[in-house]
Amino acid sequence: MNREDLLRKLENEEELSPMESALLDAYLDEEAGTETLRAIQALKREDPSFAWRARLNERLSQAAGRVRRRAQRKTVLTASTVVALAAVSLFFVYTGSKSEVRETVNLASYLYEWHEEASAAVLLPGTGSELISAEGRSGSPTRDEVDELLFGKGLVDPL
Amino acid sequence: MGSQLRAAAVAHRSTGDPALDGSLISRCKNRDAEAFSLIVDLYQARIYGFARRMLRSEEDAEDVAQEVFIRAFQNIDRFDGRASLATWLFRIAANLCIDRARRKDRKPEATHLEQGLAVEATRDTRWDPEVRAVALEMEDAIEATIASLSEKLRSVLLLHDLEELSYEEISRVVGIPVGTVKSRLFLARAHLQRALRNYLTGDPNL
């Protein structure tokens, strides 16, 4: 296959075989030092005008301002989010521990109340003659003693 | 930064230096405005030249070249260094040129090899005693021929033969397979060789 055949095939957008692809590579390498290529490479490069550059600098400084403001907004937003999260966490930690304390206090007061009621129950009914002070005892009253105090000795065992 | 880096940047314009590009990019990521200004210094002629030849309107080329640098500045944090800085900038430029051409509905028609040329390249000026005049004329002829190429062929030819990007880099810039890059380059050169046959005598492929 010669160069013209390859060109025609490429112009018709036909698929190249591996051999034709290798041939294409060879032709491209061969062209590397040609006058055409040198002529293209010799095309002059022009810098854009100073006015263009001044306009670009102005736009860049505006863009830099926008970028800076965006970064500041991001920082403020991040900081406030962190503060808000910390506040929410603290609130939950605080209210959580407080409710535990309250529960503990409630349980303690409940136990205390229960104890008071139980003591009152032991002290109030009774015959009057055998009044036992709970405060004066070292241990808790036994079931028999409580029954005796509640219902009276005479009632339980009249004989 | 200062004068040392600026001197290196001036040398870079002709040779290209990936290490300098890398250093400038890391400075830009730290919001160093002077570093970005150096990047503009290094690439403005190449980007503007590419846009100028792709769009053929000075005004459009200037707009596109500005937009390339503005977008690069705004997105420098996203530049991951997998491609070279030149590839990245040319990719932005190529996309903007295509968008601009489509928006203005100025997409040029592909010229067939057999169609011949509408440029003045057919005039035989080989015997013109004014060598400089011939050179200038040839330059005009080359520019006109490049402008007559389809957008697809033109971008590949400019990126490879003028900007000296590799096939792989062009593949990334234009978003086509390497094989297609080679095919388009071959077609573009063939078109150019035919158009310039009266100017170029020593070319074996004419």
Image: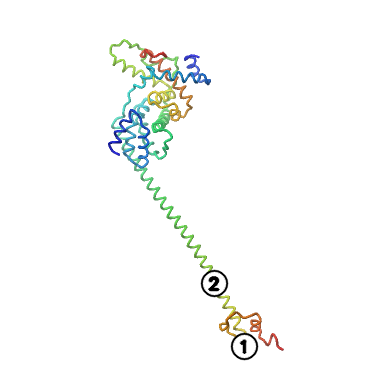
Labels 2 and 1 positioned on one and the same chain: yes
Q: Amino acid at mark 2?
A: Ala
Visual colour scheme:
rainbow
Crowding at dot 2, Cα within 10 Å, few <14 / some 14-19 / many 20+, comes out as few
Q: Amino acid at mark 1?
A: Glu
Image position of A96 with respect to B97: above or below: below
> Which residue is denoted by mark 2 in the rendering?
A108
Residue under the point 52% across and 21% down: A18
Q: Quote the CA–CA distance across marks 2 and 1.
A: 31 Å
Residue A90 % position (x, y):
46, 59
Q: Quadrant of residue A60?
A: top left
Q: Quadrant of the N terminus of chain B?
A: top left
The answer to whether residue A14 is left or right of residue A73 is right
> Which residue is denoted by mark 1 in the rendering?
A130
Which residue is situated farthest in the top direction here?
B127
The disc placed on residue A35 is: none
Residue sitting nearer the eye, A106 or B12: B12
Q: Are marks 2 and 1 in contact (CB under 8 Å)?
A: no
